[in-house]
Image (spheres, rainbow, N blue to C red):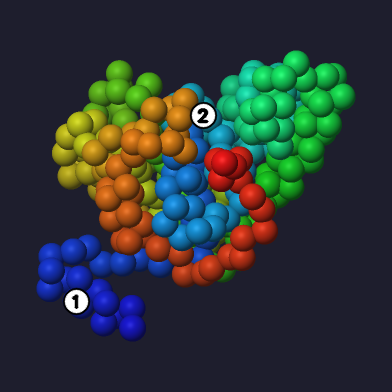
Amino acid sequence: MKNIINKIRKLFGLKPQRYYGHIISLGYNCEVSFQFFKKYHFTESSLFAWCACPNINTMITSINNLETVGSGELKPVNPMWQCQNTKIYFHGKGSPKEWNNNPTQEFFDKDLAELKSRLAHLRNKFITAGQDGKTNLYIYKCSPNEEILSHDTLELLFENLYEAIRNKCSNPFDLLIILEKRMFPNIEQALENPHIFVRRVKFFTHPAHVTSKPYDKKGWSKIFNEFKPDFKLPKHKHYKFEEG
């Protein structure tokens, strides 16, 4: 069936669909995971799926030093926790309402303990998900902070990110880079690695409101029609953005 679908897509000038046993977001923020959830109604839990990461260099360093992610001090920065080892922000279980309602020390202690335990589990999962014989897709959405870089520098950073993943992942894998339409025109033509793909949406959602409209629903849907999960997970949790 997959071959038939791809033959039909080829007739219409569409790229072939690609299927993966793990689809793992690397940030830079929650929009990748949110848009995947909107498309498929599930997400695979992973270390960086709902993080806020300053830039691609931070992600490269964090993957290369995975044991430091969330393993040291985490400071509360409403409504997230900032890992002082990496400067990446992570969500605890506490709701925005709890964060904004004069939270007690008991709230912070409980939220922090849960988060540190979860990050320890997800650090291990990042490794095991890269070594189980499946084919993986890692997705990095470029931060606007990257716009100050030159084409050549960003190309090198994409390769460095790919190599950082390769050092942790023995599975076959691809790296998908998401850019806004206006960012770095034609950079995809300069990439030589056949396992690094660049796709674009018209615009990114405001970083403070990634689970709210407006967002480029058509653009994200097109991406996730091409890069697809070869699995389906049951939904066991209720996300904060589903409230109300």
Mark in the foreground, 1 or 2: 1
Q: Which of marks 1 and 2 is nearer the N terminus?
A: 1
So how many labels did they put on this image?
2
Secondary element under disc 1, as helix, strand or loop, is: helix
Q: Which residue lies furthest to the right in this view?
A: 106
Q: Residues within 10 Å of mark 1 (few under 14, many from 20)?
A: few
Q: Residue furthest front?
A: 244
Q: What residue type is labelled 1?
A: Ile
Q: Could you tell me which quadrant the N terminus lies in? A: bottom left
Q: Mark 1 points at which residue?
A: 8
Q: Which residue is drawn at 29% across and 80% down?
A: 3
Q: How far from the left and from the top, in percent, is residue 12? A: 13, 69
Give above or below for 16 relative to 27: below
Q: Nearer the viewer, residue 51 or 194?
A: 51
Q: Mark 2 points at which residue?
A: 53
What is the spatial separation of the Cα atoms under label 1 and label 2, in whole angstroms? 39 Å
